[in-house]
Amino acid sequence: MIYLDNASTTKVDETLKDIFDKYYFEDYFNPSSVYRPSVKIKREIENSRNIIANCLNVNSKTIFFTSCATESNNWAIWGKVSNKNTAEYVFTSVEHPSVFNIAKQLEQQEKIVHFCPINENGTVDENKLLNLINENTVLVSIMHVNNETGAINDIENIVKKIKEKNNNVFIHVDGVQAFLKLNVDLQKLNVDAYSISGHKVHAPKGIGVLYLKNPQKQKQLLFGGGQENNSRSGTENVASIIALGKIVEKESQNISKNYDNVENLKANMVDFFNKNLTDFVINANGSPYILNISIKGIKAEVLLHMLSDMEIYISAGSACSSKKKISRVLENMNVKKEYIEGSLRISFSTTNTLDEINTASKIIVEQIKKLREKMIWIKWF
Ligand code: PLP
């Protein structure tokens, strides 16, 4: 099998096996209990929080564990929804469904919601974004790296400009596809909230993080036993919290090395496509972890099934929005009609090898050619 759908999820790092054995089968105590092993576990959780805070260059009191980035996004945004009917909310038109569908929900509640367009390279149109900011703007939510195209927004610069216009705007950034892939310094970015997901970075599914610059000002989403400094109740997902801490400890040292490695993998694939494939376009040129291409005259869905039969796993658009046939993100980038249905997202991890990339590139091109021939036959008969 060749797995090239790492923006969807990643293989859990094998070095974490011991952690699961330990915290599921031996030290399975509730961290809120008062006996010694529980206290020790509580300390391990705090250690994990410190590691993540260090990686992001913020205080550990601003880091909260959640069940996933979808929860982090919901908490960040719903926590800022105001009762005032003059309050305005700004989103980009290409946010992940876990943000975009909140915006749609706010619209249904007759809130004033603006969707900011993007440029043809997939990044947010900064001038249009700034034009949407006024004294009534309560929240802006903008992703760091787009999950379908890899387009990277210049968050530091955007935040600076928004705050110059209205210093009270709460700026939330979905950092799921950026965390541990780019160097992220949250003090420098100066955002108010930042969401992270464990399963995109070789930690398990079911663990997320929300950074909140001013947690005391954020409304709660989950009420209960008062865990997470009384901000997000629910018994902690001990093994996954500790596992995420271990991954961050290990990989935060390797961000640049991994970036170069993955950039090389992507460059090899692009080079092969350039030499062996006609009539395709590359959508956006951002994160090396994501390659999004649109191929003229094929249906991505059919190609994905052909590749899946050969145990090559890639995606059309993002897995989270796979029910929709045409990508909202690519539509917003004005990808041409003859190309858009043949759009593929190939997403890399540093665990992929150059051999895998070479094999997959060859097979993808062969299958596209086969599919194109079939389409010609279908047109004839
Ligand atoms: N935001 C982005 C940009 C994503 O890519 C994803 C997952 O695909 C999410 C949010 C949701 O993450 P989770 O699966 O942890 O809820």
Image (tube, helix red, strand yellow):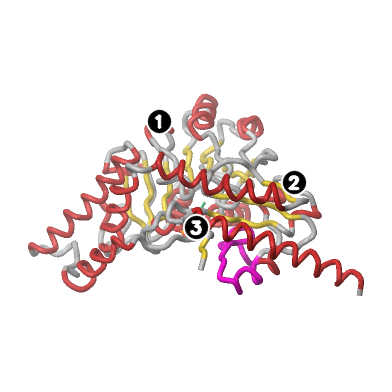
**Mark 2 crowd level (few <14, some 14–19, many ≥20, 10 Å Cα):** some
Residue that carries the numbered disc 1 in the rendered image: 188
188 or 15: which is nearer to us?
15
Per the image, label 3 sits on a secondary structure element best described as loop
Residue positioned 37% across, 52% down in the render:
209
As measured in the structure, the alpha-carbon distance from the residue carrying label 1 to the one carrying label 2 is: 33 Å
Please report whichever mark, 1 or 2, sits nearer to the chain's N-terminal start.
1
In this rendering, the answer to whether 213 lies above or below 368 is: above
Q: Is residue 224 visible?
A: no
Mark 3: is the Cβ under 8 angstroms from ligand 1? no
Which amino acid, by three-letter code, is at mark 1? Lys
Q: Is residue 2 visible?
A: yes
Q: Is residue 191 left or right of residue 251?
A: right
Q: Quadrant of residue 379?
A: bottom right
Q: Is residue 83 left or right of residue 298?
A: left
Residue that carries the numbered disc 2 in the rendered image: 334
269 or 199: which is nearer to us?
269
Across and down, in percent, residue 223 comes to: 33, 60
Q: Quadrant of residue 161?
A: top right
Q: Which residues are magenta?
A: 304-323
Which residue appears farthest toward the right when viewing the image?
380
Which amino acid, by three-letter code, is at mark 3? Asn
Which amino acid, by three-letter code, is at mark 2? Asn
Label 3 close to label 2 by CB (< 8 Å):
no
Label 1 close to label 2 by CB (< 8 Å):
no
Query: In the rendered structure, does residue 310 fall within the stretch colored magenta?
Result: yes
Across and down, in percent, residue 350 comes to: 44, 51
Q: Is residue 219 left or right of residue 6?
A: left
Q: Quadrant of residue 200?
A: bottom left
Query: In the rendered structure, does residue 307 fall within the stretch colored magenta?
Result: yes
**Mark 1 crowd level (few <14, some 14–19, many ≥20, 10 Å Cα):** few
